[in-house]
Structure formats: structure tokens, C-alpha cells
Image (cartoon, coloured by chain):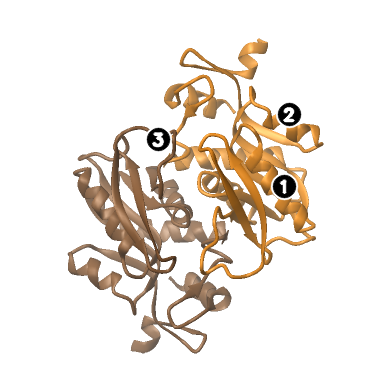
Chain colours: A orange, B brown
Amino acid sequence: MKLLKEKIKQDGVVLSDSILKVDSFLNHQIDPVLMKEIGDEFVKRFQNEKITKILTIESSGISPAVMAGLNLGVNVIFARKRKSLTLVDELYTASVHSFTKNVTNEIAVSKRFINENDHVLVIDDFLANGQAALGLLDIVEQAGASVAGIGIVIEKAFQDGGKLLRNKGIRVESLAEIEKLDNGQVIFKEEVMA
Amino acid sequence: MKLLKEKIKQDGVVLSDSILKVDSFLNHQIDPVLMKEIGDEFVKRFQNEKITKILTIESSGISPAVMAGLNLGVNVIFARKRKSLTLVDELYTASVHSFTKNVTNEIAVSKRFINENDHVLVIDDFLANGQAALGLLDIVEQAGASVAGIGIVIEKAFQDGGKLLRNKGIRVESLAEIEKLDNGQVIFKEEVMA
């Protein structure tokens, strides 16, 4: 997605050969107009799927997910990273390890919101090691629902997550695939292939 | 806001005389079409203000805030409840106590995203004791920015937050003001006055 890649080149900050900071438009400050474009692009890429629900994880997945949901007119569920006192129902849960933050979170989704009739699009901001995506897929499976695919805003293609998910036969659509972070520069996949 | 109040009556669950659960459309599952209506309503109510930024707090504030931001074409910042390793800049911070969850969180906003030229609309999902709103106002003040006002999706008018904020001279626009939660029923303010 051209607009997104331009934004990453312009405003992303490469902190190391594995860390890209995009907190000026995606995961702290949010550019809602860009999020709308991203949501619309996800819908376009999965237009052959009869999506009934979108599942994401708090907090940075919410904006792109809710824009895709607005386009499709379907509800969005965000998995919570810890239980709230007002969520006392039965929950689907999964463990997700974040290598960036070096913590393992339990993620939870109320059983009331996904069932075996649902066809679920999973959306997240980043795909690196694939741990969050696997946790979300685990929850979809527990619900007996089917997976339409996974929509990712930024994939770190130099890490294992994408391969792991695609090897499971799951369709992964990443709007920006980063081949490497090199000397402060972001190199996208097609730039290497060109 | 009629549509919102109908949704609360229809899908809200009164758990006690102080707890209303709206996790089927606002703070776990999200109805994006309703969020768009809510965002548009905030923009309408604050149309005389030259808003340059919207400030909210993760996670449930993000959806209504990002829809208001989409309408206005301005960026949204969500305060984070704890520090991330990829947020190493200088931060504005404030302490926020949640009576519902009985925890005190440090909330943080990067200094890069709000400055003295900004006119900030604060948006949150709930107003009860006003602790989150006060923390967000504290951050706006630290940045030397001005406050356009506070947009709240659901105000528990039987708790102190609304009075506290309005007594400070801050304009608070709540789209649904709950007078009381009574015997499993939601009673809105205008229903009592009628």
C-alpha cells in the first residue's frame, strides 16, 4: 500500500535492526485518515470472504480494525490483555508472549461475541514473531468459527511470524512488508526484489 | 444522543446500582457504525472550537476518538497506561486511579505530540469519578496546550466526575447521561426531569 509505505519512510524511526517506531501515526498518535485508507484496503483484499466479525487486540489494532468494520458494517472485538472486573462471563483465553516488551500476557475474549457461525478477519498493527496472531487464531478456533485471514498493517518480513502463519495455510495480507531495517533505513520487500 | 441511548437500553447490562456493562458495543465488542455516529456528534457539539488534536486513553476511548478525528482530519493521541520499551522519549505523565478496577495507573503521552499551539478535545468512553479525565487534562496543561472541552460517551451523572470537571469551568459534553441504575434499569437524566 503506497500511501502507508510513504508514511513509514517519512515518519517511521528505525531504532535498531529490529525495532521500527511508528508512534507518530499508528501506535500512540493515530492518523485517522490513514487508518480509514488502511481499513478500506483490508476490505478490498478480503472482498471475496463473507466476513461476519473482526477480531483484534488492544490497543494499536483497534483503529485499523474499527475502520475495516465501518466499511463492512460488522462488529469488531478487541481481545483484552487482562481481565476486567466488569467482564465476569466465560472467556476464551490464550497466552501471548511479546518479545518487544518481554512479557507474557493472557488475552481474553468473551464467549458471547464469537460463535461457530462466524467467519472472522483477524487484524493487527504489527506482525513480527506471530505470537499475537497465533493467540487470536487460537481464540477463533476455540469458538468453532472459521478464519477469513489475517490483515496486518506492517509485517517485519525478516522475522518468523509471516512464514509460520502462511505455512499453516492461513492467508496473510500485509500492507507494508519490511525486508530489513538497515542503517536507519526501512527497506521494503519489493525494493529488494526490484 | 437518541441512537446511543436506545442502544444502551437495548444492549446494556446493569450489574449493580453503579456498574453498567456495555461490552457488546463499546468496550470489548465495538459497533463501528455507532462509533462513527458518536464521533460525528462530538464534532457537531464542539464545532465552534478550532480543535487541532484529540486526546484519549487506551483502550475503549480509541474508537470514538478516532471517528471524531476522521471527521475533523486531526490526529488522535491515546495515553498509554504503562510505558513501552519503544517509547523512550520524554513523556508527560499523570496518575489515574480506577475505582472499578481498584488500580492506580501511570498514564503517559509523548511530549512530541502535544504542544502549546494545540487546542485539544479530550474524549473518553465513561465519566464516573472523573479520574481519567483529570489525568488527561493534567497532561494537556503540562504541554501548555488549551482544552476545547471533554466529550464523553456515557456519563454516570450520579457520580462526582461531571460536577468536578464542570466546576473547573470545563465544558463537558456527554452523549448519554445516566441519572441512576435502578433495579436493573437504566434511567437517563431527561427521564427523571420529564
- Is residue B161 among what the camera can see? yes
Q: Which residue is mark 1?
A: A137
- Tag 3, which secondary structure? loop
Q: Residue at the top extreme?
A: A194
At x 29% / y 37%, what residue is drawn? B111
Q: For the point 73% across and 49% down, which residue is it?
A: A138
Q: Assess whether mark 3 and mark 2 are in contact (beta carbons under 8 angstroms).
A: no
In the rendered image, residue B128, in percent from the top left (x then y), is placed at 36, 70
Please indicate whether residue A188 sits to the left or right of residue B110 in the image.
right
x, y percent for residue B24: 58, 66
Mark 2 to mark 3: distance in Å? 28 Å
The one nearer the camera, B50 or A25, is A25
Q: Chain of mark 2?
A: A
Q: Chain of mark 1?
A: A
Q: Quadrant of residue A109?
A: bottom right
Q: Is residue A155 left or right of residue B99?
A: right
Q: Name the residue at 49% across, 56% down.
A: B36
Q: At numbered mark 2, what does the secondary structure look like: helix, strand or loop?
A: helix
